Amino acid sequence: MLKAVILIGGPQKGTRFRPLSFEVPKPLFPVAGVPMLQHHIEACAKVPNMKEILLIGFYQPNEELNRFLFNAQQEFKISIRYLQEYAALGTGGGIYHFRDQIVSGSPEAFYILNADVCSAFPLAEMLSFQKEHGEPNSFVILGTTANRKQSMNYGCIVENETTKEVLHYVEKPSTFVSDIINCGIYLFTPEIFQHIGAVFQKNQQDMLLEEPTNGWHRAEAIRLEQDIFTALAGQAKLYVYKTLSFWSQIKSAGSAIYASRLYLSQYHTTHPERLATIKEGGPKISGNVYIHPTANIDPTAMLGPNVSIGTGVTIGAGVRVRESIILHGATLQDHCCVLNSIVGWDSTIGKWARVEGTPSDPNPNDPFAKIDSETLFREGKLTPSITILGCNVTIPSEVIILNSIVLPHKDLNRSFKNQIIL
């Protein structure tokens, strides 16, 4: 029997994902036509003998999250529950706090998946690898190869090339350590809680020696990466399974478009029914495109490559959309052009308007390059990136918006470049 735990974080995180995270919890943001979390759940539900999926985070349960959980349970015929933390406890503290729920039913092993990653999720392969390497209670990290410079932005793994044991682990080192990076997907046995518990006990002892504070929960704030993996490395307990399939973080809005592209490409083998095809009386399709059945699209529109069209979207005559995500209820009026952008919920783009951003794709000439999830500002200036329109934004006819972020409920009457319009 197996279980899976998806760490979804909470509203204090995801600042690089604003303003999109103002309207919907980041894990529910649609990527390639479905909520980000659904890709994780689909992968977990496919693993044989998977009995339950637990979501752990500190979002307040709301109607949108509850509806998603209900629909996912109905679709995948598996128990899916949300466990709310009382505070941000870290990647290790959250699972330790709910360890009784995780080990209930005596699973032989359980997966941990960070919600803000995009992956082919080779979960069955990780299980086979775990049985072939090390002792029965060994743990597995999913790893991939990054280029030398970018590797320092991740957890770095030094492996024994023969046994695949993790010999050394450093989170975001200041100098080069290894080009094998942590993908934020793990396979543990219940024995992991002994190691997390030892850190918890040490934290409690350390707190007794400090001045009293109101941070009574700090002993339970534990990070798997810095507190657990660093200590386990070199003890014949921790192994790395390297994937050759796609993987990316989803930290910023620009990385959501890149993740959408990766998932749309994967749909050819996993969900071909989700990819739009050229039909008589339908729009022109180039490359991989997802169109929700409720969207109303003029047959003279041109969509793709790498476009996702949400529920109730209206697209007029002669519209051009490429490398973009168009969210629920948006309207793209005749002959407007949308490139490298996210168009927010119920927003409107006027006739002949142009909304364009700058893609933040990895270097196409480097097979190991990863996307840089940059902050909104660099040296006091807005970083050139994709254009984001928030909820209920109206772009008038013939206006041009380039590399800008337009916050909700705005009507504009002129063109903007490299701006945040409040």
Image (cartoon, grey):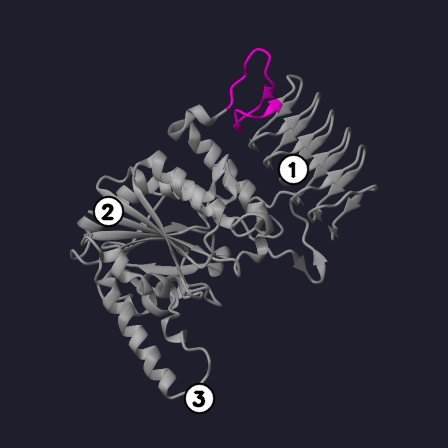
Of circles 3 and 1, the one toward us is: 1
x and y, in percent, of residue 240 in the image = 30, 54
Tell me which numbered mark, 3 or 1, is placed earlier along the sequence.
3
What residue lies at 71% left-to-right and 21% top-to-bottom? 318
For the residues bearing labels 3 and 1, Cβ distance under 8 angstroms: no
Up/down of 315 relative to 252, above or below: above
Magenta residues: mostly which secondary structure? loop
For the residues bearing labels 2 and 1, Cβ distance under 8 angstroms: no
What residue lies at 43% left-to-right and 50% top-to-bottom? 115
Distance from label 3 to label 1 (Cα)?
A: 51 Å
Q: Residue furthest front?
A: 63
Q: Which mark is residue 127?
A: 2
Of residues 125 and 203, which is closer to you in this image? 203
**Element at badge 3?**
loop
Judge whether residue 17 is colored magenta: no
Q: Given the image, on which type of amino acid does mark 2 rest?
A: Leu
Q: Given the image, on which type of amino acid does mark 3 rest?
A: Glu
Residue behind mark 1: 346
Judge whether residue 289 is colored magenta: yes
**Element at badge 1?**
loop
Region of the chain picked out in magenta, as a range: 276-296
Q: In screen coordinates, is 148 left or right of 413?
A: left
Q: Given the image, on which type of amino acid does mark 1 rest?
A: Asp
Q: Quadrant of residue 351?
A: top right
The local crowd at label 3, few if under 14, some if 14 to 19, many if 20 or more residues have their Cα within 10 Å, is few
Q: Residue furthest top?
A: 280
Q: In screen coordinates, is 20 left or right of 34?
A: right
Q: In screen coordinates, is 329 left or right of 186?
A: right
Q: Is residue 398 visible?
A: yes
Distance from label 2 to label 1 (Cα)?
A: 43 Å
Residue behind mark 3: 211
